[in-house]
């Protein structure tokens, strides 16, 4: 004999106080439009302004995730509230830091930005390799 378990999906309450359906997509769309506007500015050689708009959009998304209930967040509510907020804050602060710390793109600035990018790539590769080796050691019998 097999026993089948049927799980019901949880739905947001649809009473008078429930938000309209489109309102749940609004914070996510605002963050998405902010990132798109920042990328558009950056593509027209306004790197600092575009990156600032992207950072502001991500930080506003973190604020929306912190303050609004889950029924009004749409795709901004992916994991727990703390994980979503910290992820958006860290991404926003990183973009803001990079936009403010990258020197103007003359020849020396390009060399420095390239060297910084290579250092970051090497650090990430070393960290990934250490994590991979740590997992293999943990799995190996002995």
Image (cartoon, rainbow, N blue to C red):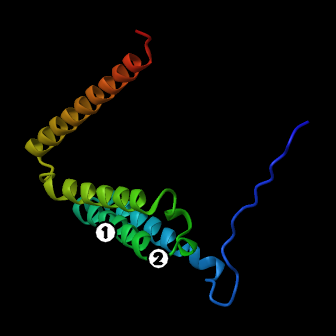
Query: How many angstroms separate mark 2 from mark 1 (CA)?
Result: 18 Å
Q: Are marks 2 and 1 in contact (CB under 8 Å)?
A: no
* Residue in view at x 25 percent, y 59 percent: 93
Q: Is residue 4 left or right of residue 26?
A: right
Where residue 67 sits: x, y (%)? 41, 76
**Residue at the far top in the pictured view:** 142
Q: Residues within 10 Å of mark 2 (few under 14, many from 20)?
A: few
Where residue 123 sits: x, y (%)? 23, 32
Quarter of the figure with residue 56: bottom left
Frontmost residue, 86 versus 59: 86
Where residue 19 sits: x, y (%)? 61, 83
* Residue in view at x 88 percent, y 38 percent: 2
**How many numbered discs sit on the rendered protein?**
2
> The residue tagged with tag 1: helix, strand or loop?
helix
Say above or below: 45 vs 13.
above
* Residue in view at x 23 percent, y 60 percent: 96
**Residue at the far left in the pictured view:** 108
Quadrant where the C terminus sits is top left
Quarter of the figure with residue 124: top left
**Residue at the far front in the pictured view:** 1
Where residue 121 sits: x, y (%)? 26, 33
User: Which residue does the numbered mark 1 point to in the structure image?
Assistant: 56
Frontmost residue, 6 versus 122: 6
Q: What is the number of the mark on residue 68? A: 2
Among numbered discs 2 and 1, the one appearing first in the sequence: 1
Quarter of the figure with residue 100: bottom left
* Residue in view at x 11 percent, y 45 percent: 109
Q: Is residue 135 left or right of residue 113?
A: right
> The residue tagged with tag 2: helix, strand or loop?
loop
């Amino acid at each position: 004999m097999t026993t089948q378990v049927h799980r019901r999906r949880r739905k947001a309450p649809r009473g008078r106080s429930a938000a309209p359906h489109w309102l749940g997509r609004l914070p996510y769309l605002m963050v998405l439009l902010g990132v798109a506007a920042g990328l558009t500015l950056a593509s027209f050689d306004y790197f600092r302004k575009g990156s600032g708009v992207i950072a502001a959009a991500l930080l506003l998304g973190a604020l929306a995730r912190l303050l609004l209930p889950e029924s009004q967040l749409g795709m901004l509510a992916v994991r727990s509230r703390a994980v979503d907020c910290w992820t958006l804050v860290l991404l926003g602060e990183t973009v803001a830091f990079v936009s403010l710390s990258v020197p103007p793109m003359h020849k020396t600035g390009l060399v420095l930005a390239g060297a910084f990018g290579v250092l970051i790539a090497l650090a990430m590769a070393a960290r990934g390799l250490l994590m991979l080796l740590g997992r293999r050691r943990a799995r190996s019998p002995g």
